[in-house]
Image: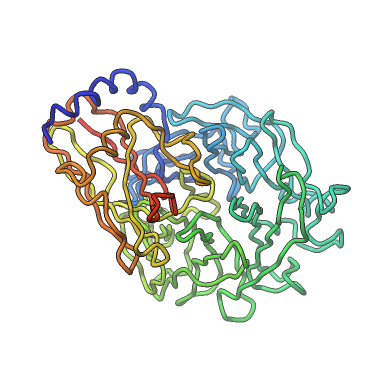
Amino acid sequence: MHPSRLLPLAVLSVAASALAQAQFEAGAMYMMSPYHVPASGIPYPGIARIDPFTGADTPLVAFTSNGVYQASAAYDPFRDRIVAYCSLAATTNPALHAIDAAGTWTTISSQYLVRLAPRGDGKIYGYKAGAGHPDVQKVYYVDAAGQQHELLDVGGAQPWLLHGGVSFASADPIRAMIYEPGENALFLALAGDNAVPDCGAPSFDVSIRKLPLTADGTALRAPAVCAEYDVAGIANADERPTGFSYGPDGRLVLGVFGNGFGAMPRILEIDPATAQITPFATTGPYYGDINCDVVAYSPLTDRALLLDGGNDVWRAFARGAAGAGQILGSYGPPGLGGSVGSTLFVVGPIGPANSLSADGTTLSVAQGGVQQLDFHPGPALAGDLYLILGSLSGWAPGFSLGGFAIALNPDVYTDFTLNNPNSPFLVGTLGVLPPGGTALAQVVWPAAVLNGLAGLTMHHVAFGLDAGLGLTHASNPVPLQLLP
């Protein structure tokens, strides 16, 4: 394939560069923290981008107050913004803000709302931690117009209540929320502090609630389902969830901070269909293993990223791993302490199929390079065709095809990847999935071939196709930043 075939990409760059520079990249990780500790400079409260490959942080926005609430920032694909309850104005009064990729912001609502969970249709579910009884048992949501509502119980006649209206001691039982579209359900993670009612009496075990929702998401369509799990395995050990994320195989990933040392399954996964809780990875034993400050799964690395605030390092854990994980890098100068109360979250569609990962997300146009892609939808798709397509126009809002949400905006580069699979530029991007359900591919760009495209970001998505070329799978998008 002659490089001149890429001429349309250079033409596209003139029209797309301004848009691309203001877009979020799929799979990018961000952390909201009351105390960011950059390698140089003064600690600050705010939001920073975290590189899931190295742990390096890049500031996005600084707050005017360090009053940060855990699990109270998330990416909302409906608004294409990070939504966060924080202080960003001249006043220190917090509010629900929408923050773009350049760090500029607007206010959605001045209402108090934490533990945020965007639904992807304009609704953002949340909670009023510390509210008086019975409000502390309610779930709220802000609609697309910024108006606040109570989530209603089955039948829609009254608000849903966590414990059916019976008072209990804890003022902050719900520590995290996430919306799961496959089940059309809202999942809540509750603290195990011997005050919060779990699936029976209060205990020290972490627990979840699965709230099946009506089609419009305004009420429960069926009673909540409860499940609990003993992380610590020892008596009187508090277990506090730190945040949800979307994991592999359509599962949810949950990080848990406790007050026990030693090897423990501090990273859990939840089957959305059954609400069953099982270990994702066991962290420890290592010095300071108690410090599981924040956790989120990265679809780019196929690893869960954990902030070990005791040792001031980022650790990466594969599914099924045990021990100390892979240390990626330092979190600021050693000895400054952890960042308990932070929120780590990922940019992407609501509930993506995390089946495409990469060995990196940047490439120099001048020097050229290779991005390794790992498509791993699993053995269930063995024997299906697979195809990897790309876009230079971003991944949101994407489009729907064959019942799948496709996180890709079609453009001239999409046509190029469709017409030139298994070319010198797109190695192994079309084939048959082997019995293990994993295929490797490469995006190869020689030096100077992409001149004129620096500053843009490519995204690639992998598809499964049956013998009749019907879609059987659509992966998450993986970015490739084109640097000078």
Percent position of residue 238, x then y: 62, 70
Quadrant for the C terminus, please: top left
Percent position of residue 109, x then y: 68, 31
Image side of residue 387 versus residue 253, left or right: left
Quarter of the image for residue 79 reads top right
Nearer to me, 37 or 301? 301
Image side of residue 195 versus residue 186, left or right: right
Residue at 43% of width from left, 28% of height from top? 102
Residue at 73% of width from left, 47% of height from top? 128
Q: In this view, which residue lies farthest toward the bottom?
A: 234
Q: Is residue 34 visible?
A: no
Percent position of residue 3, x then y: 13, 31
Nearer to me, 151 or 6? 6
Q: Is residue 222 visible?
A: yes
- The colour scheme is rainbow
Residue at 76% of width from left, 74% of height from top? 200
Image side of residue 11 versus residue 239, left or right: left
Quarter of the image for residue 172 reads bottom right
Q: How many marks?
A: 0
Image side of residue 415 versus residue 409, left or right: left
Nearer to me, 5 or 290? 5
Instruction: Say above or below: 63 vs 468.
Output: above
Residue at 33% of width from left, 45% of height from top? 39
Quadrant for the N terminus, please: top left
Instruction: Say above or below: 260 vs 54.
Output: below
